[in-house]
Image (cartoon, rainbow, N blue to C red):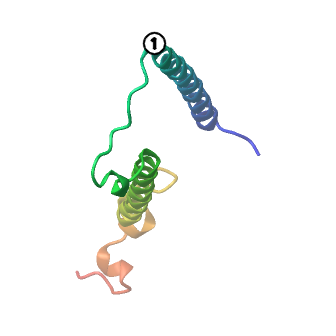
């Protein structure tokens, strides 16, 4: 399977993004370790009904699930828009598509009115 320049650029972008994320995560872990070392232990705080709130992981998972559904919906919409307007797009050889070049009556199988 051959890869296109676009695919190579996308892979490079994602790789660079992941490296940046790893650097940020390492820095965050170092910060947390440092703060834990210099701060006193805090007593636990009980908040009423806090056990009914979603966890941070649940919130992130829910937001990403929503984003996936939204992106799938937008992809379907874009495909439908392209399909709807494709009769207006020129053919592959630069000429108008065959269905556009003919009068509407001819496309419907009726003779054109004189």
Across and down, in percent, residue 78 comes to 39, 57
* Residue at figure coordinates x 43%, y 24% from the top left: 41
Residue located beneath label 1 in the image: 38
- Please determine whether, in this image, residue 45 is positioned above or below residue 78: above
Across and down, in percent, residue 40 comes to 42, 19
**Residue that sits furthest to the right in the current view:** 1
**Residue that sits furthest to the left in the current view:** 114
Considering depth in this image, is 18 or 39 the residue closer to the camera?
A: 39
* Residue at figure coordinates x 51%, y 54% from the top left: 92
**Residue that sits furthest to the bottom in the current view:** 110
Which quadrant of the figure contains the C terminus? bottom left
Across and down, in percent, residue 54 comes to 38, 53
User: Mark 1 packing: few (<14 Cα in 10 Å), some, or many (20+)?
Assistant: few
- Please determine whether, in this image, residue 74 is positioned above or below residue 33: below
Across and down, in percent, residue 6 comes to 58, 36
Residue 87, picture quadrant: bottom left
Residue 97, picture quadrant: bottom left
Considering depth in this image, is 47 or 12 the residue closer to the camera?
A: 47
Considering depth in this image, is 112 or 35 the residue closer to the camera?
A: 35
* Residue at figure coordinates x 53%, y 27% from the top left: 21
Instruction: Count numbered badges in the picture.
Output: 1
Considering depth in this image, is 88 or 77 the residue closer to the camera?
A: 77
Q: Left or right: 22 with respect to 80?
A: right
Mark 1 falls on what kind of element?
A: helix
């Amino acid at each position: 399977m051959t890869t296109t320049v676009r695919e190579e650029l996308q892979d490079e972008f994602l790789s660079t993004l992941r490296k940046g994320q790893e650097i940020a995560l390492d820095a965050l872990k170092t910060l947390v370790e440092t703060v834990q070392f210099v701060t006193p232990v805090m007593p636990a705080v009980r908040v009423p009904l806090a056990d009914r709130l979603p966890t941070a992981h649940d919130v992130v998972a829910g937001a990403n699930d929503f984003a996936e559904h939204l992106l799938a919906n937008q992809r379907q919409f874009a495909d439908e828009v392209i399909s709807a307007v494709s009769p207006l797009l020129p053919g592959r050889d630069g000429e108008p598509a065959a269905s556009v070049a003919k009068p509407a009556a001819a496309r419907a199988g009726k003779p054109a009115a004189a």
